[in-house]
Amino acid sequence: MARYLVPLAIFVVLAAFLYRGLSLDPKLVPSPLVGKPMPTFTLTRLQDPDASISDADLKGKVSLLNVWATWCVSCRAEHETLLMLADTGKVDIYGLNYKDDRAAAQQWLRQLGNPYKANAFDDSGRVGIDWGVYGAPETFIIDSKGIIRHKHVGPLTATIINEEILPLVAELQTSP
Amino acid sequence: MMKKLLTVLTVFLILGSGPLQATATLESFKFANDAEEQHFKDLISELRCLVCQNQSLADSDAELAHDLRAEVYEMVQDGKTDAEITEFLVARYGDFVLYKPPVKPSTYLLWFGPFALLILAGGLLLRSVRRQKQAASGAEISADDRKRIDELLGDRGNGEQKS
C-alpha cells in the first residue's frame, strides 16, 4: 500500500506548489519599507518649481503617495481611477512625479484632470530609489505618524480601491 | 575554400562580439585602477535588476538599472564597503536584489532543504538495499528442509564428482 501512497503524496504536494505558482505574479516584489517610517525627502513641487514639498507634508493624517510619470502607459489607465478616488474626498492623494519632464507632466494634469493635493517632482529618480520604486505606477498608504502601511504595485482599479485601499484607509483613520 | 573562410569569419565574429557586448551597457565610469573597476563589476553582477528580473544590474539596460549602477558607483567611490552597499539596496528593494539570498529563518528551507532531501533519499536507498540483501541471503530454512536439500543435492553432487 505504502508503495503507491508515498509517490502519490509526493505528487500531490508538488502539484499543489506548482498550482500555487501559476497564480503568483513574479513582478510583485514585497517591499521591505512596509511597516517602516517613510523615507525622508525634499523636492520641488511639480506645479511650482520655487516651492518645496517634503515628507513632513504627508504626516498628520492618512495619505496616499502615488508614483507616476507621463512616459508610463499604465499610469494613464490608472488616472481615471485616481480622479474617482479624489472625488470621494476620503483621503489626500499626493503624487511623486518620477523621472519625468516637468512641462509634459503639467500638461498631463491640465488635460486629464488633477487628482493630487500636491506633486513632488523627482527629476533624477533619487527619491524614487529611496522609496524602492521599480515600476510606475506604485501607490503607498502612509498613516498619520508617517509609517508606510501598504504598497500597491501596478495600476489601481476601482475594485482595488474599494476592496483594499479604502477599507485600510478607514481603519487607519479610526485607529491612529 | 569558401567554407573555410566562413568558419574563420564566424570564429572572429564570436570572439570579437563577446567582450564588446559585455561592456556596451556599462556607462563610462572612471576608475583609478583595474582592480577597482573589477570590484565594481563583480558587485553589480551579484545584484539583480528589479525591472527585468532575470538580469543582473550589470547586464540590464533598464532605466532603473542605469540609475542604480550610478548609485552603486558613487557609493564605491565614497569608499563604502560591499556590505554597506548591499544593505542600502536591500533596505529599499528587499532581499530580492540579492542573487545569493541570506541565511535566515525564512530561507532555511531554501538553503538546507536540498541537503535534508539528500539525507532522506540516502536513508531510503540504504534501507531498500539492506532489505534486498536480507531477502537474498538470509532466507531461513528449517532443519527438515535442509535435510531434504542435502539429500537431493547430495546424490547429484557426489555423483558428479567422479563416477
Image (cartoon, coloured by chain):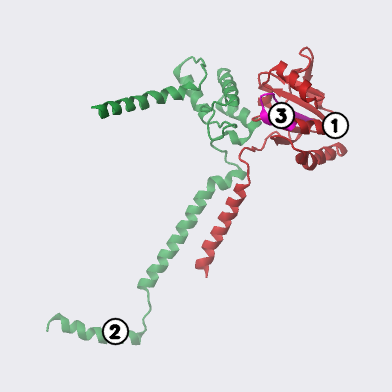
First in sequence: mark 3 vs mark 1: 3
Dot 2: few (<14), some (14–19), or many (≥20) neighbours within 10 Å? few
Of the residues shown, which amino acid type is indicated by label 1?
A: Asp
Mark 2 secondary-structure assignment: helix
Do discs 2 and 1 share a chain?
Answer: no
Image quadrant in which the C terminus of chain A is located? top right
CA neighbours of label 1 inside 10 A, class few (<14), some (14 to 19), many (20+)? few
Q: Which chain is green?
A: B
Residue B33 visible in the picture: yes
Q: Is residue B137 above or below residue A63?
A: below
Q: CA distance from mark 2 to mark 1?
A: 99 Å
Label 1 sits on residue: A87
The residue shown at (32%, 84%) is: B146
Inspect the image, locate mark 3, and give the three-letter code of the amino acid beneath it. Answer: Arg
Tag shown at residue A76? 3
User: Cα distance, mark 3 to mark 1?
Assistant: 18 Å
Residue at 43% across / 65% down in the picture?
A: B128
Tell me where the magenta segment starts and ends, as one range: A63-78
Q: Is residue B155 left or right of residue A125?
A: left
- Residue A46 placement (x, y as % from top left): 76, 18
Looking at the rendered structure, which numbered label has been put on residue A47? none
Chain A: drawing colour = red
Q: Which residue is mark 2?
A: B149
Of badges 3 and 2, the one in the foreground is: 3
The image shows residue B31, relative to residue A94, as above or below, that is above
Element marked by disc 1: helix
The percent position of residue A128, horizontal first and vertical second, equals: 68, 25
Query: Is the Cβ of the residue at disc 2 closer than 8 Å to that at disc 1?
Result: no
